[in-house]
Amino acid sequence: MAPENNGGLKVWRLLFVSALLIFGAILGYQAGLLIVASVNSPSSTNSFASASRDILSNSSQRATAFCAFTLLGILVARLLSTPAFGKLVQAGDRLKEMQPNEKVAAFAGVLVGLLLTLMLSYCFPIRGIWGIWLTIVIGIVLVYLGVVSTWSMKDDMRFFLPGASPMPSDAQETPPDQCKILDTNVIIDGRVADICRTGFIEGPIYVPGFVLDELQHIADSADSLKRARGRRGLDILNAMRTEQKMMIRTYDSTDPNDRDEVDAKLVKLAKKLSGKIVTNDYNLNKVAELQGVPVLNINELANAVKPVVLPGEEMVVTIIKDGKEPDQGVAYLDDGTMIVVEGGRRRIGETLTVVTSSVLQTVAGKMIFARIRDGGEDEEEEGYDRSLRAYPRSGPRRKIQH
């Protein structure tokens, strides 16, 4: 639920709980009346009824019994109010995701069911508390049947609306152009939300149903790490829904008997919708490209916007561990780029100014090789000029002229 709706949600919760408490109090009082009436009935001759009749013979004791039953009804209603309101909010969230014709069909079904219940209650009146409960049960059954009936005609109900024009049967199935389809990994990663917020990803964003099911399965995992990742993905989707134009489960039309993996389903769906897959999965990226499906890879975007480091540039880094080769130390930039510092093994834990020697581009990203500025003992012996900018390791170095 969006933060701006929390105030309204609290008001609805208060009204719902208050109404349920009043209903529980009335129901408890009616139950007390029934029990007292049955105990005081002359036909009740068992020992329990006789003992209860003696206890309830006093008016003050009867009032105490009525109060006890009323409080019991309030207590039961209070215990049921929280889960009942949670189910009501979930139903409201599902209602938001429904198409307009589906909402009209559901409303019409509820209205038809209530009208039939009202007609039956007048035609066949049943008195007493049992009649009320029987009417409620019949109403629930008729409302359900009415919704099912009108739901099956949701595509045809447009013709019964004023000013409606004929519409092709597949008009609701026409997907938008160039929709961006999110996969599970990129949702959990979370960077896609920031990218969408900046406006670099345009057009509608689509979350397939099988991706949402996989997220829910991960969020329900017994592994605490997987469960945290799944819940993070769901939280990111909820935040994106309030900021972006997002569609969920709208154009899946997948075969329920399809046993393919999620990646294969994503590629099929992207080809069907002529959309683009947004992912950070290297394998999915290659498979989609082989099948001619456009891919927006978040990792490639992150590598592309990293600051360019040229040989000879200086930077301040902290040596945190030793490297693979002798006398090497390893540092990292803020964006995660690894820097291999020559002569840095003995300076672990220190913050130093280093000069870039060369830059190596790999599949995983960039790797920078550097040396410590004014800290190379070998250079002091050879007499290199410290004021000069460094060149790549394979290039010539200029010496100081004596």
Image (cartoon, helix red, strand yellow):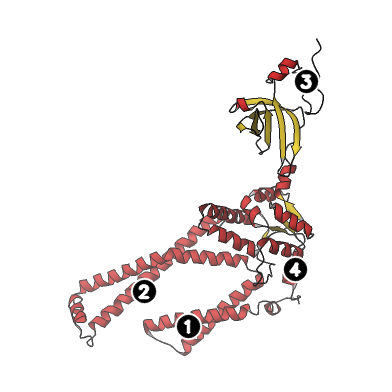
- Tell me which residue sits at (79%, 14%) in the image: 400
The mark nearer the N terminus, 1 or 3, is 1
Residue 297 visible in the shown view: yes
Q: Which residue is drawn at the image coordinates 21% and 79% (left, top)?
A: 48
Q: Mark 2 belongs to which amino acid?
A: Leu
Query: Counting residues from the N terminus, which is met first, the one under dot 4 or under dot 1?
Result: 1
Q: Marks 1 and 2, Cα distance to the nearest angstrom?
A: 19 Å
Q: Which residue is mark 4?
A: 174
User: Residue 170 in the image: x percent, y percent?
Assistant: 74, 74
Q: Is residue 313 left or right of residue 21?
A: right
Q: Which residue has dot 2 on it?
A: 27
Label 2, label 4: how many angstroms apart (C-alpha)?
51 Å
Position of residue 205 relative to residue 194, above or below, is below
Please tell me whether mark 2 sits on a helix, a strand or a loop.
helix
> Hey, what amino acid is under mark 3?
Leu
Query: In 3D space, how far apart are the residues under numbered discs 1 and 3 (Cα atoms)?
Result: 91 Å
Badge 1 is on which residue? 138
Residue at mark 3: 388
At horizontal 60% and vertical 28% (from top left) the residue drawn is: 348
Q: CA distance from mark 4 to mark 3?
A: 64 Å
**Alpha carbons under labels 4 and 1: distance apart:** 40 Å
